[in-house]
Amino acid sequence: MKRKGSSIIFINDEGQILLFLRDNKPDLPYPNMWDIPGGHVEAGESPGKCIMREMKEEMDLVLDKFDLFSKIEFEDRIEYTFWARADLNIAEIELTEGQKLKWFTRDEAKQTHLAYGFNEIVEKFYSEAPFLR
């Protein structure tokens, strides 16, 4: 059975998405690469509960309003990607994982090799544009 991942795309009023730079540790998958916030779904946990827990642990954010964007089966996992509108002041967020946060435009994200194959999901997100509905 494949493991499950849960991630979230935060989009601000300028249409930028929030990415974080992964820690640069040799034992970490995709070290020093940009990534979408999220993590692994634990046993008995729903993907929605997972993303709420991960954002509380990693950024001290309390998520209350977010929607499922996609469920994609990759070779290594099933990824549940949520999305939410958020104009977060990233200078005020203290990360417990990762090196830093940055807002990316669609073009910047497209030109950046994202961890875990997230380029596909980001492009799908902008193409389907649920934030415009």
Image: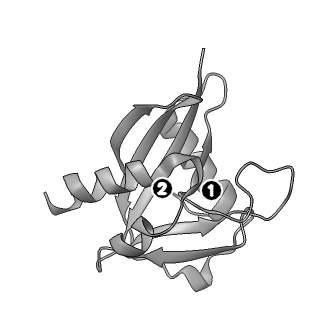
> In the image, what residue occupies the spot 38% across and 56% down?
122
Local secondary structure at mark 1: helix
> In the image, what residue occupies the spot 50% across and 34% down?
47
- Quick one: 60 or 103, which is closer to the camera? 103
- Quick one: 25 or 46, which is closer to the camera? 25
85 over 64 or under it: above or below: below
80 over 51 or under it: above or below: above
* Residue, disc 2: 63
The type of residue carrying mark 2 is: Leu
Q: Where is residue 49 in the image (x, y as percent from the top left)?
A: 53, 38
Q: How far apart are marks 1 and 2 (CA)?
A: 8 Å
Q: Are marks 1 and 2 in contact (CB under 8 Å)?
A: yes
Per the rendering, the mark at residue 98 is none
- Asked if residue 93 can be seen in this view, the reply is yes
Q: Residue furthest left?
A: 133
Q: Position of residue 93 (x, y in %)?
A: 62, 76
Per the rendering, the mark at residue 56 is 1
Q: Where is residue 114 in the image (x, y as percent from the top left)?
A: 54, 58
Q: For mark 2, does the 10 Å Cα neighbourhood hold few (<14), some (14 to 19), or many (20 or more) residues?
A: some
- Quick one: 76 or 59, which is closer to the camera? 76
Q: Is residue 65 left or right of residue 25?
A: left
Q: In this view, does 82 lie to the left or right of 27?
A: left
Quadrant hosting residue 37: bottom right
Quadrant location of the C terminus in the rendered image: bottom left
Coloring scheme of the render? Answer: one colour
Q: Where is residue 46 in the image (x, y as percent from the top left)?
A: 52, 30
